[in-house]
Amino acid sequence: MAIIIDENTNVLVMGITGRQASFHTKQMLAYGTKIVAGCTPGKGGQVVEGVPVYNTVREACENHRIDASVIFVPAPGTKDAALENLEAGVKVVVIVTEGVPVYDEIDIVAYARRKGAYVLGPNTFGIVSGGKCKMGIPPNQYFVEGDVGVVARSGTLTYEIVGNLTANGLGQSTVVGMGGDRAVGLTFVDVLKMFEKDDQTKAVVLIGEIGGNNEEIASEYIKEMTKPVVAFIAGKSAPPGKRMGHAGAIIERGKGTYQGKVEALTAAGAKVAPLPFQVPALIKEALGRE
Amino acid sequence: MKMFEYMGKELFAKYGIPTPKGRMAKTPEEAEKIAAEIGGPCVVKSQVLSGKRGKAGGIKFPNTPEEAKKAAEEVLSMTIQGLPVECVLVEEKLKIDKELYMSITIDGSAKQAVMIASAYGGMEIEAQPEEYIIKKHIDPELGMHPFFARDVVRRMGVGLRTPHGKEMVNIIQTLYKICKEKDAELVEINPLVFSDDRVIAADSKVTIDEDALFRMKDLPFVEDKSPAERAAADLGLSFVELDGDIAVMANGAGITMGTLDTLQAFGGTPRNFLDCGGGTGREATAKALDILLGLEPKGLFINIFGGITRCDDVANAFKDVYEARGGFPVPVVIRLVGTNQDAGREILKSIGVEAFDFMQDAAKRIIELVK
């Protein structure tokens, strides 16, 4: 098992004819992802990397079973693309696009909730089911099958930590990118609950950052979990009032500080790694492995 | 993008939220003229994108046009928290019967906009005890309705049939309209003032979502970044100046923060935050390196874990800058792994630079080199 996606997931790539999307379609196929369709309005009938392109998501759904979509369209068109997929009944929508206006994000997330669908992102690297399926943009070679679940707000920091896990012989069940923006579809608690239930997952790595109170809320749930959680929180050295790249990564009015998050997580029984490369040792310790 | 107080008030006035009589002035003479038009005691407020203007002496209360001129002269020569005052707002001095608070902002945890209100305004909302603060989320699918506003006003303890209550019901609905139509991530009125029968927005704080500026062409532009931050923003990169001595470039917000944290943990001090992620190409990466060298750091640390960023693009950009400048003026350490890693390392090797595999080793090395 794994969470959200697996080797049987049929994937649609939204905006597949674009430069980034076609490059990553090739990478996803190389990873083993079952991409069955692409969609770019006005480019129906083309074929990209062997994948048929349709004009609308509805048209793609008439020809294939679509379980999940990954969206690569520019920010001004992202809301429309996401709603199109949700309206067509797609249950997992991964939005890679950065720079989506926050009120568009709020509308996407609200509609997804009504449709009972999962939205990852906006501004996510995607999701990887270790060795089975990848949706999004992470480099393939670092993501291998195993029993560590990973949930994160940030992309490259996740590659860094997953790279360290893999180098230490720790594969992953599922690696979930929630997205770095303020109004994203999932919360840490949503994903932690799935990992807690997932048979394949034996321990969880939570990769957070300053800003907001997602990590603090997660701490309340971690108290109830039976599986060990190891966390890393980025932004210890960040000054207050400055937005550190992600729209959500800002200490505002004394809230969302590194210290506050570490205290909450530690009190909940999670182990917090001071630096990214120290995560694997803490996971091994928690699982009683050499 | 933060807006100046006077811009926020102009926006409020356009939407029908009552604001004090008066307007913005760039010279003491203009301020004098506006004060004469108002005819009576005034307030002259410095226009800078920072709080604590009152404490810094940036708000004055002249009684005559002559005094207003003198007050404006003083305020226009001030620098408040490092920001020069370039204009003032000259307004009628309000008779204040009561000060209240209202704002709408984004609650990322709830993934909704949230109305925050208090019957006690005038000070920072964070300084208020929790029981004085009213929070009510706005369901995006339902939108704003009169009943929502009435409930907030009721909870603020203001009678719905009073002139104040009726006006506040309008103001609340209008604030949300501004948020939606102008993509404002924050609209704040602090204080909202009762002055006899009037309800007036005595201050304004409006922040527009930077990601929505592409569809907000009719708003005035406000520069709220340093020159280096602006240069990076024009390249589509996030950049924050810090006060250390090692310039940093990494790809991705999280890993850039992680890089700064790692440097600091080993005793180094970062000069900046620069996220050149998201598929930044060779040319923009080279320009970003120029921005970093322009900061005159003692060393340069590049930490790339390529996903959508390609290592060969970064290596080529590095080589371009290296060749254009005939080498680097300060020690440089590069950690380079991920997409197209081998191609990137070949390029670096051609100019005699070895890349590191691990961030922690690279971080230690640059700290040694700048010592």
Image (tube, coloured by chain):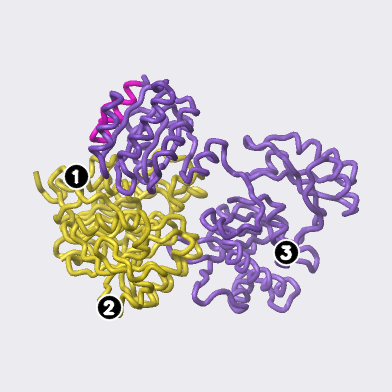
Chain colours: A yellow, B purple
Q: Where is residue B368 in the image (x, y as percent from the top left)?
A: 32, 22
Which image quadrant for residue A280? top left
A32, A171: nearer the viewer: A32
Q: In this view, does B48 lie to the left or right of A106?
A: right
Q: In this view, does B222 lie to the left or right of B291?
A: right
Identify which residue is drawn at 66% across, 58% down: B218
Look at the image and give the residue range highlighted in magenta.
Answer: B353-369
Is A219 magenta? The answer is no
Q: Position of residue A165 (x, y in %)?
A: 19, 46
Marking on residue A280: 1
Q: Which amino acid does label 1 sit on?
A: Pro
Mark in front: 1 vs 2: 2
Secondary structure, mark 2, is helix
Secondary structure, mark 1, is helix
Q: Label 2 marks which chain's residue?
A: A
Identify which residue is drawn at 25% across, 37% down: B343
1 or 2: tag closer to the N-terminus = 2
Is B366 magenta? The answer is yes
Which image quadrant for residue B341? top left
* Residue B161 in view in this figure: yes
Mark 2 surroundings within 10 Å by alpha-carbon count, few (fewer than 14), some (14 through 19), many (20 or more): few
Depicted B167 relative to depicted A242: above or below? below
* Residue A259 in view in this figure: no
Q: Position of residue B51 (x, y in %)?
A: 63, 45
Secondary structure, mark 3, is helix
Q: Mark 3 points at which residue?
A: B14
Q: Mark 2 points at which residue?
A: A63
A51, A107: nearer the viewer: A51
Mark in front: 3 vs 2: 2
Same chain, labels 3 and 2 = no
Q: Which amino acid does label 3 sit on?
A: Lys
